[in-house]
Image (cartoon, coloured by chain):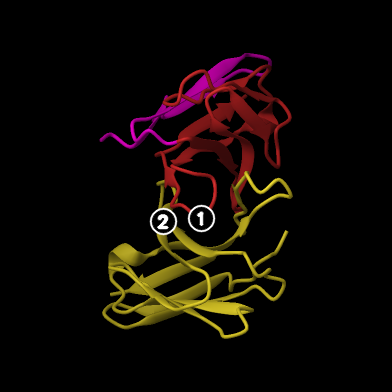
């Protein structure tokens, strides 16, 4: 299974942009890059996903390196409610092609300072 | 839509007891799964199902059973609880197994004494 590497923690100030990095040097050509976040005492929440091109939605932007060996989740203006653990996840598809597993690592704990 | 619901929110068991964690979704999702989360660790997949009547093992299936008789429900059974099963359990669902956004429930916190 392709693995991801994220910093254990990051800190940001409110209203400033945040760039959360993720390395996935063994990514395969058909692996999608997903980002989820988990607020304290809640279940994980989908943030964004992409394959090759940069992606934007109302929550964040995803910048994917040209070689796809790394990606960056961008929160354009961090708020206190963005304080969470952010997980960078590659989609695992087994040889059958019909199953799907989200493999969570330890993620990055984002602290947002007022 | 209620989304993904889980009951109970919190449960205390004694070693050797059995119980069922309930998970239901009202989004007509085919794919459902169970994860456990231990302190300082990410989520680990226990079992998953790609449709009614179809289940498969995830990363840490030992000590747990699942069945999927309907699209809506995916209960997780602990056959004989052990302290090592103390954890927070999350259920998730999506339309299809691949690519699609997964929706997670609020979790069940289980303490096994």
Q: Is residue A10 above or below residue B96?
A: below
Q: Residue lying farthest top?
A: B17
The boundaries of the magenta stretch are B1-29
User: Which residue is located at x 50 percent, y 38 percent?
Assistant: B31
Q: Residues within 10 Å of mark 2 (few under 14, many from 20)?
A: some
- Judge by depth and name the residue closer to the eye, A100 or B63: A100
Q: Is residue A71 above or below residue B46?
A: below
Tell me, by letter, which chain the rendering colours yellow.
A
- Give coordinates of residue B4: x percent, y percent: 38, 35
Which residue in the protein does label 1 denote?
A: B99
Which residue in the protein does label 2 denote?
A: A46
User: Which residue is located at x 59 percent, y 53 percent?
Assistant: B42
- Give coordinates of residue B54: x percent, y percent: 61, 27
Quarter of the figure with residue A76: bottom left
- Give coordinates of residue A104: x percent, y percent: 59, 55
- Which chain is disc 1 placed on? B
């Amino acid at each position: 299974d392709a693995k991801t590497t994220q910093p254990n923690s990051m800190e940001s100030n409110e209203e400033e942009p945040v760039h959360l990095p993720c390395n996935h040097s063994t990514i395969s050509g058909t692996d999608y890059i997903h980002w989820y976040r988990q607020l304290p005492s809640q279940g994980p929440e989908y943030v964004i996903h992409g394959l090759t091109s940069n992606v934007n939605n109302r929550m964040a932007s995803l910048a994917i390196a040209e070689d796809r060996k790394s990606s960056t989740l961008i929160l354009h203006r961090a708020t206190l409610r963005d304080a969470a653990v952010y997980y960078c996840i590659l989609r695992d598809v087994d040889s059958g092609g019909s199953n799907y597993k989200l493999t969570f690592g330890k993620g990055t704990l984002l602290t947002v300072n007022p | 839509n209620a989304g993904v619901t889980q009951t109970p929110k919190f449960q205390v068991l004694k070693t050797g007891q059995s119980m069922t964690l309930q998970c239901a979704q009202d989004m007509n999702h085919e794919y459902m799964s169970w994860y456990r989360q231990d302190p300082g660790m990410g989520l680990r997949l226990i079992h998953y199902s790609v449709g009614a009547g179809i289940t498969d093992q995830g990363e840490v299936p030992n000590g747990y059973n699942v069945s999927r008789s309907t699209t809506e429900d995916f209960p997780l059974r602990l056959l004989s609880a052990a302290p090592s099963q103390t954890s927070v359990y999350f259920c998730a669902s999506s339309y299809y197994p691949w690519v699609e956004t997964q929706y997670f429930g609020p979790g069940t916190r289980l303490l096994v004494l």
